[in-house]
Every structure is written in C-alpha cells, then in structure tokens.
Image (spheres, helix red, strand yellow):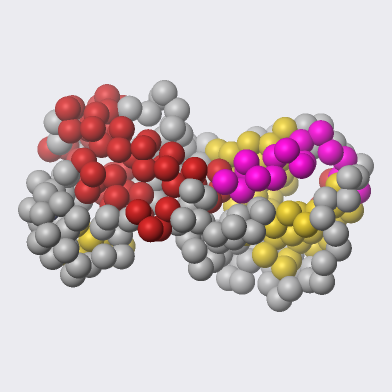
Amino acid sequence: MPELPEVETTLRGLKPWLVGATITEVKVRQPALRWPVVDNLPDLLIGQVILCMGRRAKYLRLSLKNGSLLIHLGMSGSLRLLSANEPWRKHDHIEVVVHTGKRIRYHDPRRFGSWSWTFNEHHQLTNLGPEPLSTHFDGNHLYRLGRGRKLPVKNFIMSSEIVVGVGNIYAAESLFRAGIRPDRSAGRISLKRYIALSQHIKAVLRTAIEQGGTTLRDFVDSVGDPGYFKQQLKVYGRHGRPCTVCKAPLKLTRLGQRSTVFCNRCQT
Ligand SMILES: [Zn+2]
C-alpha cells in the first residue's frame, strides 16, 4: 500500500513537471474508483493552470484557480509521468496531459484510490493531526494526547487525528528503534520515551522518502524506480527471524487487525 513516503516521492517526482503547466487534455477511462470521478472532470480541468501541488497526509493536492483536485492512491494506486502517448496498460484509469506534452497516468488495480474535485475545502482534510515531519509533531504532542489513553501505542501513533501518515510499517519500525513495546498503553509512556519515539518516526520516514518508499511490488515512483527502504526494515515482515540487536527470535502479535512484529527483549 502506498504510504506517506511513496506519496511524498510521487509529489517530488511530478511537481517540477506540473506546477505552472496548463492542462490540455483529460481522459477518464474508468470513473468507478473508491468514489465515482465526476463526469465533468475534463471540463473543470482543461485550460486551467496548475498553480501549486502539495501533500497533506497521504493526499496529493493540485490547486487550480477555480478549485482543487485531491488524489489518494488507495491500496494500489500509482501515478506515472510519461513523455509521450504510450499504449494504455490494464488498470490505467485516468490521464492528464499538460501543454509541454508531459502526461501523468493513474494506475490502480484495486480501485480504492480517489480523484475528488472541490471548489472549496476538501472535507477529507478536516480533523487531521499534524504532519509527522513538521515542527508541530514532537514528543510533547504525543505525551499530551496520550494521557489517560489505554489503547496500544502502535494504534495510537497510527491514528490520523494524533499524527498523519504513520502507517503499519513505519509504526513498527519506529517502536523497535525507540525500544517501546507496540502493545504498551499510550497513557503509560514517559515524556522522555515519547521524545525518542517522535524522533525515530521522523528519521524512519525521512530515510524512506530519500529511498523512495518501501512497497517494491505495487509502487513504482514517477520515474519508474522502485523503493529501496525495504532493505532496511528491522522488524516489519521479519517474524521468527533473529532480532538485529539481541538475536532473540522476533515475535508476532496482532493489534487492531494488523500484524505486528517486535522484539520481546529489546522493546519494553
Ligand atoms: Zn532484541
């Protein structure tokens, strides 16, 4: 599943080609995504200049003069930058062409992604916690919001109203690096440990962004390179294998329907 690093990598790959460009063509071959793509999307976009492009949580936002387009990659979506009109592949659903001839094509086998248009504010973006790489997110923030909370810390840091974009892989990896058991109650973690955890979350996400994300199978970044962060995972997907620190076999547990791997010795 594309996580924050993949979305950020996609943004960085596409932005230089799209910002300031005028949209000349829009083709929607399959409008049945998670929510139906509006029928008049081509009319709304053609002739418009892309004023800016950004990311909030796992959403990509293209701002135009008359409104904005919010793209979510869902479970299996990806955006590819093409220089010419290449043949459409199976599961290629939407294409946007700009005046320079560059085009982005949206590919999504499972169709859980979305392309939504609005003239005002996107309701999907309300009630979201801070961006993990911003200064609004730190150990104090986690400590303050964690007081009195019984839910496991892994579920806590994966809640989008607490902080956005900390997916399953990054939550497990940051908790291991901070030495915190994933099933410990959010309310029973000291400020000092939350400071360490917030720093590890930032470091893990930054490294993953630099390396283009983790999802080697589903994700291809905008220039076609797969993500390499996967090679640095210490716990995720390593159940039963030796801990990289103490060599004890890593344990598997389930928290909130998600499998979680951790070290019973190094994480307390
Ligand atoms: Zn260990």
Examine the rendered structure and indicate whether residue 85 appears above or below residue 200: below
Pinpoint residue 256: horizontal percent, then vertical percent: 28, 59
Examine the rendered structure and indicate whether residue 4 appears above or below residue 76: above
Q: Which residue sits at x=40%, y=58%?
A: 230
Q: Which residue sits at x=72%, y=68%?
A: 92
Tell which of 210 and 26 is nearer to you.
210
Report whether 36 appears left or right of 158. right
Q: Which residue sits at x=10%, y=54%?
A: 246
Report whether 64 appears left or right of 34. right
**Magenta residues, dominant SS class:** helix
Query: Is residue 256 visible from the viewing direction of this image?
Result: no
Query: How many numbered marks does the figure carry?
Result: 0
Pinpoint residue 145: horizontal percent, then vertical percent: 27, 31
Report whether 96 appears left or right of 197. right
Tell which of 212 and 121 is nearer to you.
212
Examine the rendered structure and indicate whether residue 62 appears above or below residue 176: above
Tell which of 55 and 150 is nearer to you.
55
Q: Is residue 131 magenta?
A: no
Pinpoint residue 214: horizontal percent, then vertical percent: 45, 56
Which quarter of the figure has residue 107?
bottom right
Query: Is residue 226 visible from the viewing direction of this image?
Result: yes
Q: Which residue sits at x=48%, y=52%?
A: 213
Pinpoint residue 93: horizontal percent, then vertical percent: 73, 66
Tell which of 161 and 76 is nearer to you.
76
* The residue stretch that appears in magenta: 9-24
